Image (spheres, grey):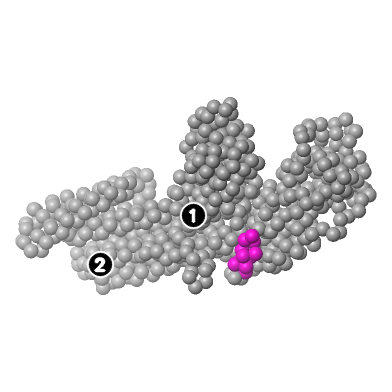
Amino acid sequence: MANKKHALVRIIIVALLYITATILHYTLQIAYYIELPIFIALYLAISFDILWGAARNIVHGKVFDENFLMTIATIGAFVIGEYVDAVAVMLLYQVGELFQSYAVDKSRKSIAQLMNICPSEATLYNNGNPTTVNPEEVGIDDIIMVRAGEKIALDGVVVEGESHIDTSALTGEYALQAVGEGDKVLSGSINSENVLLVKVTAKYEDSTVSRILQLVEEASDNKSKSENFITKFSRYYTPIVVVAALLLLVPAIFDGQWYEWARRAMMFLFVSCPCALVISVPMAFFGGIGCASSHGILVKGGNYLEKLSHTRTYVMDKTGTITQGKFDIDKVIPQENSEQIVQYAAIAESCSTHPIAVCISAKAKGNIDYSNYSFSEQKGNGVKATSKDGQQTILCGNAKFLQENVIQFEVNEDLQYTATAVYVAVNNKYIGSIIISDKIKTDSVEAIRQLKQYGAKTVILTGDNQANAQHIATLTGVDNYYAQLLPQDKVKKLEEIIQNRSKGENVAFVGDGINDAPALMRADVGIAMGAIGSDAAIEAADIVLVNDNLTAIPTAKRIADKTVAIAKQNIAFALTIKIAVLILSASGIVTSLILAILADVGVSVLAIINALRTLKLRKSKRTGKATLQKQS
């Protein structure tokens, strides 16, 4: 129903007129030729959209749908003289449709809220003169001004000003984040205090807010197995019940009771409408996607919710996933040449997007001419930079990389578990090392604990050394780990884990970097970190965590489990009631047309109410854990 208010007014007016006409029908002996036109007029008033829908679908070759069933059933009721019941049936059916329309809108609400995070304009500030433009007109490296109370239109880095930004539109949780010069800010966040000047780092179509909206819009394209089952079921179910209704007229050939058997056939058609199944199951998954969106979890389709509900193994990258991925230089060895070592390392690492490389490049002083060098990278080990005149060669990487290049140096054995050593050599002479450290995310331990409560197994795949990997696994409670893996090794190890999984169980991979994209695509369920994750990882993933918090994974798991459970409940409930009432109608035990349609509408309403339970999470007072809130 395009306009629910108009539909409600129509239902109320027709209902009042119908009640009046029905009272007169049963209290006064009104002539047939007088009251029949009245009920026909009421019938047309309440059902013209259904009649038009049935005719239009027939023209387009889509004959057997609920509009067709309701049309032939009610027209048949008029033929056998049951026009009072025929109008009642259409009236009750429209009430059910209106209720369904309101329910669908409610399930869309949490997703629709995401549409409000999209700013309609940006303030361009390139020449010191603020100009209001469409965000799509702003290019990379342009400067935009964000005043207090305004939404940040595009992803960027603060170049001037200090403030606090509200990221709740992206993460689903209200939290103010302090930002200043050099800090990254995401589109869709709200500047709460002072004016900020932001250097744009991504075009509008590539910005965080744009990717979020695109993912939400595409989510409905990927149906779960349950939804596909309903689609196929309806395709065969409707023609079968129409044939079955026609077969109910066969006994009339032998006993001559055409009225009785025609009545049973009409009731059979009323009850057979598959509305409860066709609407409630997709609504359950749509509600689950909406609930996930409100918690900063973007699910690209109902099929991924269904897969997640059967996931028992979670394989995770370490850097940027379990740890913060925000590296900083602890110290440089030897200290006396620290600035020179960082400069050389920055030249070599300029071609890499690895967090360690980004950290080193950020610490380099002055402008460095990278164009004078050619680079060759040994993924997971290091980079070789050679000047174009051949006079200088820089090696920057782990101990294995320098050893393979026959460089004499002393390996740092006293590193902390969360620290990494980057060794640097120039013209085959070792000049020192840079010690870089990362920290475990505050929510990693809790996320692993919650996943274990589901009986899940957790695994770390990392390119880091054995000692670091073991220490991180011990601190977080991860069950197993595999260290010193190159990107291609991660995929191979993931393949092994998938091959050894139990039947009917899925394996998820959680990552954030470009090098994680192959593993994200290979896993049954790919989960990417949305804020710090690379575009490649986000595109390859099936689920994106906007706020980068690992605790969103058990939250997504709870939503997935409940969504699938509700979908299965609706299928079982609807089929059981439908089959039971169909048998009772065909056998003549249920004789009222109104009771038959009430059974159909009642099943639909109850199934829809059940589906709405997927829409919200609440915290249990007893356990403090997030659980799905029942709605009624």
Q: Which residues are magenta?
A: 442-452
Instruction: Classify residue 257 by image quadrant.
Output: bottom left
Which one is earlier in the sequence, the residue at label 2 or at label 1? Answer: 1
Q: In the rendered view of the protein, which quadrant contains the C terminus?
A: bottom left
User: Residue 313, position in %: x, y?
Assistant: 64, 64
Q: Is residue 574 left or right of residue 184?
A: left
User: Residue 526, position in %: x, y?
Assistant: 62, 55
**Which label belongs to residue 595?**
2
Q: Nearer the viewer, residue 432 or 228?
A: 432
| Residue type, numbered disc 1 | Ser
Q: Is residue 430 left or right of residue 542?
A: right
Q: Helix or strand or loop: what does disc 2 sit on?
A: helix
Instruction: Classify residue 350 by image quadrant.
Output: top right
User: Residue 190, position in %: x, y?
Assistant: 51, 44
| Residue type, numbered disc 2 | Leu
Above or below, 265 against 47 in this view is: below
Mark 1, other Cα within 10 Å: few <14 / some 14–19 / many ≥20: many
* Residue at numbered disc 1: 294
Q: Residue at x 60, y 54 (%)?
A: 548
Q: Would you say residue 543 is visible in this rendering?
A: yes
Q: Nearer the viewer, residue 282 or 288?
A: 288
Per the model, the C-alpha gap separating discs 2 and 1 is 40 Å
Please tell me whether residue 359 belongs to the stretch shown in magenta: no
